[in-house]
Image (cartoon, grey):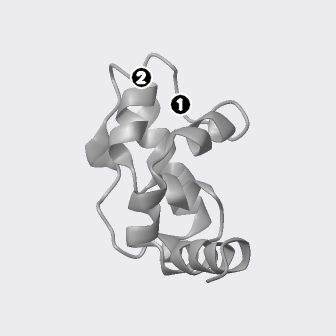
């Protein structure tokens, strides 16, 4: 299971780049297909490192988190997070029974 919601942000670096704007360093976030296995402290370290030179300054939970959560592409998250896929599939089955 994902350790923090910010793990999902790692799946959509293009949205992070757009959100933080000029000065964001996408290379500070390595591409991984197992985003839910990235330790929580490493997730925050990567987000802070990538964003610290941006016009919105370094990532901080609360200041940026819920805005970004509303912007990320759920399809990208589902592709790289088996638990997110399971959650979405379960919700679809419960809310949209066949």
Label ID, residue 54:
2
Mark 1 burial class by Cα count in 10 Å: few <14, some 14-19, many 20+: some
Residue 53 is at least partly visible in this image: no
Q: In which quarter of the image is residue 83?
A: bottom right
Residue 56 or residue 93, whichever sits in front: 93
Q: Tell me what residue is drawn at x 55 percent, y 70 percent.
A: 39
Task: Specify whether 75 is left or right of 59.
Answer: left
Total marks shown come to 2
What x and y, as percent, mark residue 25? 31, 36
For the residues bearing labels 2 and 1, Cβ distance under 8 angstroms: yes
Q: In this view, does 32 lie above or below 61?
A: below
The residue positioned 44% from the left and 26% from the top of the image is 20
Residue under circle 1? Answer: 58
**How far is mark 2 from mark 1, CA to CA?**
7 Å
Disc 2 on helix, strand or loop?
loop
Q: Is residue 92 left or right of residue 37?
A: right
What is the secondary structure assignment of the residue under circle 1? loop
Against 66, is 41 above or below? Answer: below
Q: Which of 71 and 36 is in front in this view?
A: 71
For the question of whether residue 65 can be seen, the reply is yes
In percent of the image, x 42 and y 60: which residue is there?
75
Q: Estimate the x, y position of residue 12 in percent, counting from the top left.
A: 39, 50
């Amino acid at each position: 299971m994902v350790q923090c919601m910010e793990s999902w942000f790692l799946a959509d670096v293009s949205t992070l780049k757009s959100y933080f704007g000029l000065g964001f360093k996408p290379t500070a976030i390595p591409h991984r297909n197992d985003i839910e296995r990235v330790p929580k402290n490493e997730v925050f370290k990567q987000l802070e490192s990538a964003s610290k030179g941006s016009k919105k300054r370094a990532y901080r939970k609360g200041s940026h988190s819920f805005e970004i959560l509303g912007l990320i592409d759920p399809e990208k998250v589902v592709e790289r997070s088996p638990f997110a896929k399971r959650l979405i599939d379960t919700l679809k089955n419960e809310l949209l029974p066949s």
